[in-house]
Amino acid sequence: MTARVLKPAPAWLVSSEQPIGPGRVGRRKRAAFLEKTLGDGAEVVRRAMYAESADPRGDRPGVLFRIDPRIKLVALVVLLLGVALVHTPVTLAVVYLGLVLLAWAGGVSVGAFVTRVWLFVPLFTAVALAPATLSVITPGEVLVPLWTWHGAQEGITSQGLTSAGLVILRVACSVSLVLLVTISTSWNRLLAALGALGVPRIFVMVIAMAYRYLFVLLGSVLDMVLARKARTVQPVAHTAGDRRFVGAAVGTLLGRAGHLSEEVHQAMTARGYAGQHHTLTGFRASGLDLLALAASLMVAVVIVGGDHLLR
Amino acid sequence: MADTEIVFHAKGLGYTYLDRYPALDDVSFQIRRGERIALLGANGSGKSTLLKILDGLVFPTSGELSAYGQPLTEESLADPAVNARFRSRVGIVFQNSDVQVFSATVREEIAFGCLQLGLSAAETAARTADVLDMLEIEDLTDRTPFLLSGGQKKKVALASVLVMNPEVILFDEPTAALDPRTQHWLIDLIAQLGEAGKTVVLATHDLHTLADLTDRAIIFGENHRVLADTQTRAILADRSQLIAANLIHDHEV
C-alpha cells in the first residue's frame, strides 16, 4: 500500500504573502462587555465555591467553621424564618449588624462577606424595587418630587422608601445568613448534612450536579468567547451575523455542556456514587453545636419578639 | 482456563449513538484476570465507548456482556450491593481528567470512591495518605483539583481510582496531552500495576510503548468491528494490519 498523495495546497496558502489585514482597525478598546462579564462571572463563582469554601483544617478555624453542618442548616432555617417575620427596618438593620459581628467573631473575612452581599442585593433587589418607591405605586408623602400630574406632585415617597428599604434589608439579612453557612462549610459536607437531615437523595443529587455543571458551563462559555476573540481584530458590529454567533454559541454550549456533564456523572458513578454523599469527617454534635442551636432559636425568638414590640 | 477467571465476556456487542451513529458493531472477546490488553484503533473507532461499556457506565444496544460471570446490565447494577461490588472491582481512568476531579480538595477527591463504597473514614484517610505518598503528590493534598495542571490532574484522577484498589483498571488514552516526563511516569506506573497482577485494559492509538505495557491487543477497524485480537508483538509486526486500522501511515514505517 502506498501513502495517500495529498491534494496540492492552494497557492495563497504556500506563498509568502503578508498575513491578512489589518485592514480597517478600530480604536483600542477596553475588553468587550460580554467577555469581561463572563470572565468576571466565572471568577466570582469560582471564588465563591472553591477559594473561600471552608477548610476546617486551617491553622485556627473560627468558631463558625467548627459547628456541625447539620446544626448550621437547622439554625439557618430557623433564622431565615425569623427574618421573614420581621416588619420593621430598624429590627432588620440590627439583625444585619449582628450578622456582620457574627461573621467577624466566627472567623469569616468581613470584607469579603459584606462585599458579596452588597454586590448582589442592589443588582437584583434594588433595581426591581425602584418603581415601588414612586408615588404612583406607593402613595404617600412625596420626599423627592419628580413630576406633576393634574397639579399634584408625584415622585419618591417616604412610604415607598420604607417599603423598599424593608425588602432590601430582609434580602440582605437572608443572603448574609446563607453566605455565613456556605462560606464556613465545605460543599461536600454541606451536601452530606442535607442528606443526614433527611433531604431526599434525588434533591441532593440535583444540587450536586448543578454545582459541578456550573463550572463546566462557565469553562465552555469562556473558551468560546476567547476562541472568537482570537479571530477578531476589529470591533464587531451588532449585525445579524453577530446575533447568529450568539445563537450558534448557545446551541454549541448546550451540546458541549450536556456531553461533559454526562461524563462527570459517569466519573462519579464509576467510583460508587449512588446519590448519597459520604465525607471523610463524620458528623458528631458537640456541646458547642447544641449551644449554637439553642442560641439560634433564642435569637430568632428575640428578633420576632423585639420586632413585635417596635411595631 | 476456568470460567471464574474470565473477568469480561462480550458476545456480539453493538452500540449506536442516537440510533444513527454506530460506535461498535458485533464485537466479541474475553478478558481474563491479570491480562494486560490494549484496545487499538483510530479516532472514533469505538474504543472509549467500549471502555465505558466495560465499566457499566453505558450499556450496549445489542449483544451481551458479562462481568465476573454475571450479566452486566442496567438492571443488575440497579441493585446497590451488585453495584458496590462491581465498582470496587473495576476502576476507570478517563481521558479527560477534568471530568474526573470534582471535589473541593485533592484529599476529598481521592477519598470520594472509598467513602461511597462504605470504607470507614479512618481506613479511607490512611489509604488516601498512602496513595498521595506513592504518587508523590502530598503537596497537592489541600489544593483545589480543578486548578491543577494537566499532569497533576491526571495524577489525582489516577490516585482517586488506585485508592479503591480495583482488580481491573481501564485506561482511556492514558498518555494523551501529557508532557513527556509525566507520560513516562504514567507508563512506568501502568507497567508496575500490570506486574502486580492487576487486569489492565487501555484504549490507545499510541503504539510506542504498547509492547512494554500489554501482552494482547484488540484492533478496531474504522467500521467499528474487531479487525484482530492477538498478541501485541504480533500485531505490532503486522504492518498491513496497522495501516488498515489507520494506526500507522506509510511514511511512518
Image: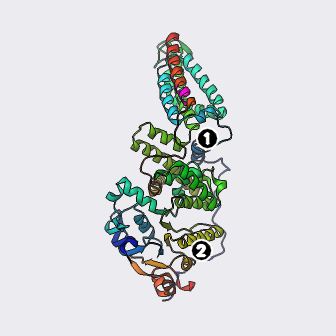
Residue bearing the label numbered 1: A56
Residue bearing the label numbered 2: A13
Residue A290 is covered by the magenta coloring: yes
Q: Amino acid at mark 1?
A: Pro
Instruction: Give how far across and how far down residue B94 sits, in percent.
Output: 50, 62
Residue A72 is covered by the magenta coloring: no
What is the magenta range?
A289-293
The secondary element bearing badge 2 is classed as helix
Front-most of A197 and A103? Answer: A197
Instruction: Give how far across and how far down residue A123 sits, in percent.
Output: 55, 33
Res A258 → quadrant: bottom left
Sequence-wise first label, 2 or 1: 2
Q: Are marks 2 and 1 on the same chain?
A: yes
- Picture residue at 41% right of the left edge, 37% below the top: A198
If the image is split into quadrants, where does the N terminus of chain B sit? bottom left
Q: Amino acid at mark 2?
A: Leu
Instruction: Please say if A264 is above or below A200.
Output: below
